[in-house]
Amino acid sequence: MRKFEGGTTMNEQHSMAQTSARVVEALKAGRAQDAETLCRQMLVEEPSSPPFLRLLSHALMKQSRLSEAEDQLFFALKIAPDFPPLHEDIGSVLAMQDRFEEALPFLEKAVRLDPSKPLTHKKLGQVLAALGRGKEADQTFQDFFDKDPDREQAAVGLEHIRAGRLDEAEKTFKQALRKSPKNVDAMRLLAVLYKQQDKKLSDAEALLRRAVEIAPDFTAAWLNLGGILQENMRPADAIGCYQSILNYDAENTDAHAGLASAYAASGDPDKALATYEAIMSSKGNIAGIQMGYGHVLKTTGNQPGALRAYREAVRLKPEFGEVYWSMANLKIFQFEDEEVRSMEAQLKNPDLSDPAHIHIRFALGKAYEDQKDYANAWEHYDAGNQKQRRLVSHDPLEMEQMHQQLIDVFGEDFLQAHGGNGNEAPDPIFIVGLPRSGSTLVEQILASHSQVEGTSELPHLGRIAASIGKYRIDGIHYPRAAQDLRAVDWTAYGKEYLDAAANHRMTDRAFFTDKLPNNFAHLGLLHMILPNAKIINARRHPLDSCLGGYKQLFAKGQNFTYDMFELGEYYREYDKLMKHWHSVMPGKILDVHYEDTVLDLEGQVGRILEHCGLPFEEACVQFHETKRAVQTASSEQVRQPIYKGGLGKWRCYEDQLSLWKDALAPVIEALPAHIQNAGR
């Protein structure tokens, strides 16, 4: 039987929907006790269900048991802190007890989270009036009366999203926009839906831009737009979004936090730190702000400061799993015993969300690994991966088909027939490979050179690939669509990449790095559009590479790493594709083994610089002394001198790795003996 997220089956979801309908029917009929009984029965099976906790509170309110209703709502809020109806209901139950001052912030937040509900505006106006704030009440009532009837259709779509009926939600929002093309709520919610599904992101951006054009003070749309732009590596544009909010709402904490995060992503950590410190000065301690502050301190190399911020965030919010993982992700950091006990205790917390559970599992894996308790460490890593895999999407068959198409299209004959047409700029140095295989170390070596700027993991090559043939009506897309490109197109795409990458450059150095590992799939395209770009393939013993990926909880992407079988298959696909690129572009790609770099740093530095056409500089050997912001998981490791402790780490987990050992045996056996034996 098909399973859904959280482990519920289709039948179970249908049963929950039927019970919910019966509860609503009982409430409408005035049978509050029957509704209460149904809710409590369902909560035995689903104790952390915000919808049923909310329905239970309604049943209790109908019986004038207001304090009990209040308790249920605050419990539900711990599970779903950003669920607008909970804020509205808490405001209502407090107002029903004449606790208007306490009710006000909850109703205000309900409006901020979901401004589409006329009734919420009405309730807010009533509370403001009760507090004697007549002018504000009048404005709020005006908002209520001005609500477009079409907003109700957007609200219906929102309910579809919350119930997991995503196709129905999309249809509803589109119907609303056909009926009223200026329905900004439908625009925003459709964009949010696209973002949640990680599809049609350009359409999502267009919808949000249209919404804020129509309603320049639409805070939620500006925040959503800023978030999408940041994820698409356009921090400068995101900064503009947050500043647009602050122009008319100077105290908006979410906008200040977004601005700080965007400053950090744009390579301006000083502004990011100053913005976070200003928020803390005016708003006091907020767990999420402390975490963001810690992230920026980490990228600048201030590990003690980052730890203080992370620990303060945990003190404010003990169930904040993401912070525990952020601490673990410092890599060279070790948890204190009390922190390990606290994480173990949180795993027993029935209110712990799935993301928090996953973050804590990965953090505990790191904690027990540092204690050399590898069996316990593996148990946590494995549990975290299995839970995370259920929350992400990865289609191995689709990936294999894409890789085969790349091999078929970008063959030797095609490259020779169409070569020499791209942009001739020699500026970029691409560092590719698999995650946790030493790419950050190679980047740090190069960024220590006086002629090289280290940028980041840039998404632009992949975006260019995805755009080729995107709008063809015959259904032929990349990579097959590349066969129809003209000489002028290859040159134009090269310029497009360079223009996009320029937004991430902060210096006038001659060369820059792009270390997005996944670019290994697009090296044929890269060679066509930027024939003079340099390419370095960061490699590592396959078992250490797979293990490193399996121990890492990635902020975004790399969804193939959360299942052992899929990860092993992905490595085989990577190896096959890299062999193809070496075959059709001999001498173009330099393989740099992590093991060789650790065992012979100066020799490998020489190879890397020679491949890039750069003179030798001692600073590249002393890479750990280079001061620069590093945002990847290895940020703290590359600030330390070379150490051999990471070689052959897989041997600590050898009993659990038989699947990879069998699947990758041909690749391992082809390695030089000193790499096979590294770490013995």
Image (cartoon, rainbow, N blue to C red):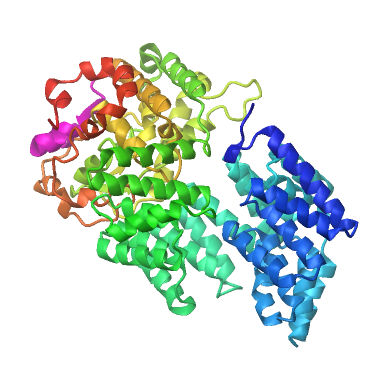
Residue 351 at what x, y percent from top left?
54, 55
Q: Is residue 558 left or right of residue 636?
A: right
Q: Quadrant of residue 276?
A: bottom left
| Nearer to the camera, 511 or 75 | 75
Residue 97 at what x, y percent from top left?
74, 78
Q: Is residue 453 left or right of residue 450?
A: right
Q: Quadrant of residue 197?
A: top right
State which quarter of the image contains the N terminus.
top right
Q: Is residue 402 above or below residue 231?
A: above
Q: Is residue 554 left or right of residue 303?
A: right
* Residue that lies at the very extreme toward the top in this rendered image: 413
Q: Residue sitting at 49 percent across and 18 percent down?
A: 401
| Nearer to the camera, 618 or 644 | 644
Does 136 appear in magenta?
Answer: no
Q: Quadrant of residue 314?
A: bottom left
| Nearer to the camera, 606 or 12 | 12
Q: Residue sitting at 29 percent across and 49 percent down?
A: 367
| Nearer to the camera, 13 or 669 | 13
Label count reads: 0
Tell me if residue 182 can be seen.
no
Q: Residue sitting at 46 percent across and 55 percent down?
A: 235
Residue 677 at what x, y percent from top left?
14, 25
What range of the chain is rendered magenta?
586-611
Residue 604 at what x, y percent from top left?
13, 34
Q: Residue sitting at 48 percent across and 52 percent down?
A: 230
* Residue that lies at the very extreme toward the right in this rendered image: 29
Q: Main secondary structure of the magenta part?
A: helix
State which quarter of the image contains the C terminus.
top left
Tell me if residue 32 can be seen.
yes
